[in-house]
Amino acid sequence: MSVELNHTIVHSRDNRESAEFLADLLGLETGPEWGPFIPVVLVNGVTLDFATIPEASITPQHYAFLISEAEFDTVFGRIRELGIAYHADPHQKLPGEINHNDGGRGVYFPDPSGHGMELITRSYGG
C-alpha cells in the first residue's frame, strides 16, 4: 500500500498572514484562496492549508521542514533579517543559537500564530 500525506489544515489567527509568512520565508508561493483556506504547497506536493479560527481555539503545533544546506543559509538569513526569535532547541533553552544534530543544522522559530516551526538539513537519525 502506498500512503502519502496530501494536506493538513493549519489553524491560524489570520490565514493570509500565516500562509504568506511561511511562503515568503521558505521562498514558496501561496495558492489561491479556496473556501476558508490559503494553501502553501511544498515541493513534495503536500499542502499546508491555513485556516483562520478564533485565537483562543489555536493549539500550538510543530511543523518541521527538511531543506538543503544552501536553503538553510538563505532562510536563516531571512529569519535574522526579520528579527524573528530563534532557538537551537524546541524548549527554547538555547536562544539565538542553531543546532548541529545528526551532522546537519537546525533551528526553531515561531510563526505568527504561535506554532513551532523547525528547519533541519538532515533527517533525524542521520
Image (tube, grey):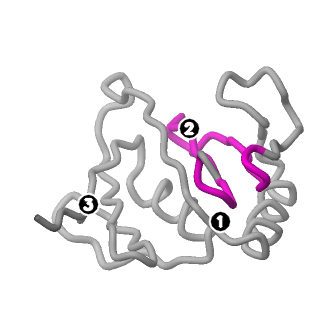
Measured from the top left, where is residue 113 in percent x and y? 50, 39
Circle 2 residues within 10 Å: few <14, some 14–19, many ≥20:
some
| Residues at marks 3 and 1, CA–CA distance in whole angstroms | 22 Å
Q: Amino acid at mark 1?
A: Leu
| Residues at marks 1 and 2, CA–CA distance in whole angstroms | 14 Å
**Circle 2 residue:** 116
The boundaries of the magenta stretch are: 101-124
Circle 3 residues within 10 Å: few <14, some 14–19, many ≥20:
few
User: Which residue appears at 54% of the width and 34% of the height?
Assistant: 114
Give whichever of discs 3 and 1 has the lower sequence position. 3
User: Which residue appears at 75% of the width and 44% of the height?
Assistant: 101
Measured from the top left, where is residue 69 in percent x and y? 77, 70
Q: Amino acid at mark 2?
A: Gly
Mark drawn on residue 25: 1
| Quadrant position of residue 72 | bottom right
Q: Is residue 53 above or below residue 2?
A: above
| Quadrant position of residue 112 | top right
In this view of the protein, which residue sits in the foreground, 38 or 44?
A: 44
Foreground tag (1 vs 2): 2
| Quadrant position of residue 120 | bottom right
Mark drawn on residue 109: none
| Residues at marks 2 and 3, CA–CA distance in whole angstroms | 20 Å
Disc 3, SS: loop
User: Which residue appears at 83% of the width and 49% of the height?
Assistant: 83
In this view of the protein, which residue sits in the foreground, 119 or 104?
A: 104
Report whether 116 appears left or right of 101: left
Disc 2, SS: strand
In this view of the protein, which residue sits in the foreground, 123 or 55?
A: 123
User: Which residue appears at 77% of the width and 40% of the height?
Assistant: 86
**Circle 3 residue:** 5
Q: Amino acid at mark 3?
A: Leu
**Residue 68 sits inside the magenta stretch:** no
